[in-house]
Structures are given as C-alpha cells and as structure tokens.
Image: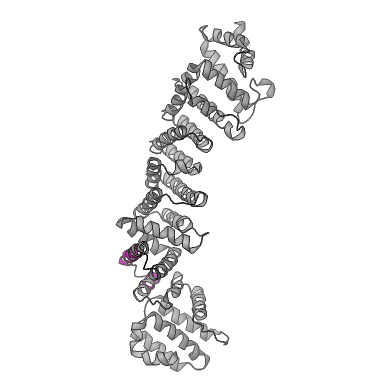
Amino acid sequence: MNDFYSLDSILEEMIFARKDKPMAYKRYSKLLISGRHEPVVDFTMKSMIMCFLPNGVPEEELIFRDPSAVSSFFLNLCRDYPWIVGRELTHADATRRYRMALIMRSLFSLKKSLPTINVCKELFAEPVAPIWRSFLALMSDPEPDVRIVCLQTVEVLLKTQIDEQIVSDLIASLSKRLRDVERLIRCESTLVVDHCHRLEAIVDRNLMRHFVARIGDQSLDVRKRALVGVSNVFHTIHRKYHKTEQYFFYKLSTACLLRYTITDIEEEKAFIEMIFVINLLDTKSGSAVKMANLLELICLCDDCGVQSISQVFRNQFKLRTLFAKLIYCTERHHFNTSIVKANHKVYKSLEKAFDYIDGSDDVLKNFHLLLKDYDKQGLDELKCVFETKTALDCRQSVAAIEKLFECQHNSVPNEPLIALKDEIMCRLGVGLMDTNAISELFGLMDAWSGQYSQRLASFVVILSKCYSHYFADHSVICDELL
C-alpha cells in the first residue's frame, strides 16, 4: 500500500533513466502485478496529460515538469511496458482512448518545439511498432471525438515527419477518414489536407481522389470546406513547388467543374469561379503563366469539362479576358503542335459557351461576333471592350480604343460627345450592328459638325474593322475616312 502512495516519486525516478534507476522500475512492476494495475495506469496517464493541459496546473502538483520529461518517460514506458499504452489505445472506455489520443497528439507535436525529440520515429521501430499500429487503428475509432483528435495528430505528423513509410501510413488513414460517415470528420479531414502543404502528401492519387470528391459532398459545410481546401492546396502547388501535377490538376478542375454544373447555390458557384480566377489564372503571375494554366486545363479536360469551362466563361469576365489573350496567342503560334491542339480546344470550349448564350448576355454575344470576325491586324486588342458593359466602363473602353488607334484629338469632352460615345458603345455592346445601324451612324456624321464629325469618323473606322461585313456598302466612305 505504501508503494502505491509513493507512485509519484516512482514516476519521477523513471523519467530519464532505465538502467541507473532499476529499483524504480522494479517497484513500478510490482505495483502493476499487484492486482491494482488499473489505478496505477490511470494515475500514470493523468500525470502525463497534466503537463499538456491548456489551463495549466500549479508546478508543485506536476510530476512531469516539462514536455521533454513526458516524452522520455513515455518512450521508456513503451519499451518496458508496451502493453500499457496498447491497452489504453484499445480500452473499452472511450474516455481512456480519448485521453491516450490526446497524450500522443501532444507528444507528437513536440517535434516542432523540440526538434531533438521524435517520439513518432521511435514508435515506428520494433519492438514497439504494435503501438504505432494501434494508433493507426484508433483513426477508425467508433467515437467521433477520438477520430477528430487522431486527425489533428495526423496533421501535426504530416508537417513534421519525413519518413516515407510513416507518411504513407498517415495518408492511407486520412484517405479513409475523407469518406467517414460523420460530417464533422469529413470536414476535419479536408482541413488536414488543406493545412498539410507537403507535396508528397498532396499529390498522392488515392488521397486526391477522395479529397476532391468532397467538393460534391452531400453536406454543404463539407463542400465549402473542400472548396477552400482545394483552392489553398492548388495554390500551394503552384507557389511553393512551381509545378503542376497533372493528375491533381485534372481531378481538381473536373471535380470543381462538375460541381459547378450541378449546384444551384450561387455561393458555391461564386467560390468555384474564385478558384479559377485566383488560382487557375494566378493573378499575381504574368500572362504567360495564366495562359499556360488555362491551356493545360483545356487540353486535359474531356467534353464535359470543356462544357463546364464554358459555363464559368459565361460568368467570369476575367476568364473571358484570358481567353482573348489565348486566341491572340494561338493565332500567332500556329506552327507549334501543342498550340494547334490547344487552339482547337479553345475554340471548342468557346463554341460550347455560345451554344448556351443567354439572350440578355450582351457581352457574350459581342465576344462571339468578334471571334467570328477575327482581324489579325489589331482586333484582338479590342476584346478588352467586352469585359465590362457599364456606362462608365464603356467610356473608359472607348478612350482605350482611341489611344490604341491613335485617334487622339484636342477637343474638350462635353455632354454631346459623351452621349455619342454611349450611343456607339451601346450599339457595340448589345450586338445590334447591322446595315440599318451603320446607316444611322453615317446619318449622325452628317448631322453633327466640326470636332464631333471628326471624332465620329474615328469611331466609324474602328467599327469598320470590327464588323467589316456590315460596311460593305460603305467601303468608299470608309476609305475616304482613312
């Protein structure tokens, strides 16, 4: 009995030394076989976890004064009494399993603050390897709270462990939890993948297959978490590793695009669009990187993926602008075999977009018309006009066009001139350019005089470049204006 009451002093002696303090181990073993091992083990575990309690415990009440003491004692315990840890990990009482999971999470986390301590690596080696396997089995514990703690432990280990087999075991367990029946577990699993930032884990095919599948999860919370995770992981690949793993790229993009075509929730659609704009188009990189990303996506996607890209295209002005640059690029590099293939896919994706043109989508109608009447002498630069359609943006676009074609004049803008700009941009914006509209514009030239007719003549020249087939009957006048 006296031995039991001096258990705290026994534990203190067992912390760092095994051989030079044999009496402590002998007394501890005696307590374990005395028929009272349950309270002994319980006291041992409580003493260990007190060191990691968030609210803290008065130092005089602590047996283990610092984390390094706990880790040393724990490893000694695993070597000399492995059945204790193994029994706690498989105990019938869920609170005991939960406590053991918390202890292991805390111990495995020491690698970050104490680089010389690698408890996980020690457990992975024989003869204590069964403890590691018991921990992996705990990932499938029937209690959700236990599984969540284990997932948090996996997150720590994926950030700190470099052993290939350890990482492989963790990825396999994490893949299973991505398919967990509990919504909270699936959500936590996507969070672990999101926070991982390890390429060897991120691009594992089995893990990625289940990770991107969460984009189509039945739970809205999981889908949101998955979309955030997918966005962050994809950005990590490009930013940190400067490469695109094609399999992940394909799984990510097709999963996002599939969800985009299915969901009716505008918030989800907007987030998927954001993934393409921020990550796929990589707004902090140059046009070459953006185009390479989009070309790769288009080339990898099947017909369903291309159709989904078309849907994103219809809603994202930034994507339209990039498509305009792609058209410019593919038209001028037709000698490159890969560009020819990409060119075919670009037009194919755009044609699919035009199959679903909304009658009220003036911008898209203009893009289509402009694509059909592509002018290699400078029409590609005009595509920036179709990115926006507000009155203010129209005026800014007109100014950009004037500068592009060196149609600058010294006249001071006034209300009639602004009205003229709006009139022309309105006609250009709603795709109403026809022979009647052209005749009306020439009528305006006759009705207005001086600087306005000069400026209007500049616009007519620009329009004739955009819609040359509508100016066939006025070619003589256009030549005179030039």
Q: Where is 64 relative to 294, above or below?
A: above
**Most extreme residue toward the right, as rendered?**
60
Q: Where is 110 relative to 82, above or below?
A: below
Q: What residue is drawn where x is 41% and y is 87%?
A: 441
The range drawn in magenta is 343-366
107 relative to 370 in the view: left or right: right
- For the N terminus, the quadrant is top right
On the question of residue 101 being in view, the answer is yes
**To which quarter of the image does residue 106 belong?**
top right
Where is residue 386 shown, x and y percent of the image?
Answer: 43, 72
On the question of residue 89 being in view, the answer is no
Q: What residue is drawn where x is 33% and y is 59%?
A: 306
Where is residue 52 shown, x and y percent of the image?
Answer: 60, 28
Which color mode does the image show?
one colour
Q: What residue is drawn where x is 52% and y is 91%?
A: 451
Number of residue marks: 0
**Residue in the foreground of this view, choosing between 160 and 44:** 160
- For the C terminus, the quadrant is bottom left
Q: Is residue 361 magenta?
A: yes
Where is residue 335 shown, x and y percent of the image?
Answer: 36, 68
**Residue in the foreground of this view, choosing between 336 and 133:** 336
Q: Is residue 248 magenta?
A: no
Q: What residue is drawn where x is 64% and y is 28%?
A: 56
**Most common SS among magenta residues:** helix
